[in-house]
Image (cartoon, helix red, strand yellow):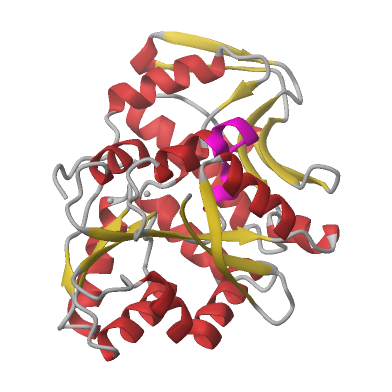
Amino acid sequence: MPISSILSPSATELARHVAEGLHRAPKALSSMYFYDDAGSRLFQQIMDLPEYYPTRAEFAIFREHGPAIAAALSPAGGGDFALVELGAGDGAKTKLLLRELLAAGTPFTYAPVDISAGAMTGLVATLKEELPALNVAPVVEDYATALTQLRTWPGSKAVLFLGSNIGNFGPAERLDFLRQLAAPLAPADRLLIGFDLQKDPRRIRAAYDDAQGVTAAFNLNLLTRLNRELGADFNLAYWQHYTDYNPLNGAVRSFLVSNRAQQVHVAALDETFEFAAWEVIHTENSYKFTLPQIKALAADAGLRVVEYFTDAATDFADVVLAAR
C-alpha cells in the first residue's frame, strides 16, 4: 500500500467505488478501503491474535533467514538501491530486514508505501527512533499510484509485498498486478512476496473469524468509514461478519451480512440502497497457495522464482522473484 503526493484516495473515488459496488449482484466492496486509520489499528490487533498464524510464520522466516533474504535482495554488484515496500503498515517484520541491511553496510533507501497516513506517521516516527541511520522516503498512496511511480524510479530496486496481501486479489487481478510489478523491473531488480500456504482448513478459517471478534470489528469498520466519509446511515447492529474457506480453490471469502430487510441512504450519492434479509456484501478474498501454484503464477506474469524461504511448519513462504 508508497515519494510525491501525501493523499489518501479521495472521497470522490470512494463514492464512485461504493456506487459501483452496491449496484452489483452480489454487492461487493473492496478490501482496499478497510485501511483507514481505525482499520489499520484493528489490523495491528488482528496480527497479535492467537488464531492469526500468518504474521508469526512470516516473523519466523525473517528471524531465521534474515541474512539470506537481505543478500538475495541486494544488487549483485553492490551499489545503492531502493527498498520499496507496498503496504508497509507498522513495518514490524521489515525492521528485521532493515537491521540486517544496515549491519551489512549496504547503501539503500527504504521507501515504505501505505494508504493510511496515520500508519505512515507512526512508522516514520518509530524508524527515526529505532534506526536513526536509516534513509527513509515515505509515500502515502494506493497501490496503483505507487506502481506508476515505480516505473520511473531511478537505479536498482527491491520491492516488498509481504503479509500474504497477494492473496487479496482474485486470480485475474492477481496476474494483472504481478505483471504490473514485473514491468518496471530491470534484470538485477528483485521482488519479495509473501504467500500464505494451504494447510488445515480449520486453522485457516479460524484465522479470519477469531473468538474475540476483532476480525468482525475490522470488517464492520468499513461501514463506519462509509458513514463518516460519505454520510451513509448504516446501523452496525443490523450487520454481522461472516467468513468461509473453500479448500478446493484455496479461497477465504469475507462478507458483511444484513440481518434484516433494510434501506441504507448514502448522502454523498443521494441514493438509497435496498438490502434483503441475509443479503451479503462481499468485502474480501484471501487466497492460499501451494509452491507449484506460485511457480506457475510467476511464469504467467513474466517472472521467475529465484529463491524461497519458509517457516519450519511450512505455513508460509516468502518468495524472491526476478524478471525473466
Q: Residue at x 32, y 44 (%)?
A: 184
* Front residue of 91 and 214: 91
* Front residue of 166 and 252: 166
- Quadrant of res 157: bottom left
Q: Is residue 148 left or right of residue 226?
A: left
Q: Is residue 103 left or right of residue 152?
A: right
Q: Is residue 293 magenta?
A: no
- Quadrant of res 199: bottom right
Number of numbered discs present?
0
Q: Is residue 294 left or right of residue 76?
A: right
- Vertical position of residue 278 compared to residue 163: above or below: above
Instruction: Give the overall secondary structure of the magenta segment.
Output: helix
- Vertical position of residue 142 compared to residue 52: above or below: above
Q: Position of residue 173 (x, y in %)?
A: 55, 33
- Quadrant of res 230: top left
Q: Residue at x 77, y 59 (%)?
A: 198
Q: Residue at x 61, y 54 (%)?
A: 215
Q: Position of residue 186 (x, y in %)?
A: 32, 51
- Vertical position of residue 118 compared to residue 299: above or below: below
Q: Position of residue 319 (x, y in %)?
A: 55, 64
Q: Is residue 173 magenta?
A: yes
Q: Residue at x 56, y 39 (%)?
A: 174
Q: Position of residue 99 (x, y in %)?
A: 32, 85
- Vertical position of residue 123 compared to residue 227: above or below: below
In the picture as drawn, the residue positioned furthest to the bottom comes out as: 103
Q: Is residue 109 left or right of residue 209?
A: left
**Highlighted magenta segment, given as a residue range:** 166-175
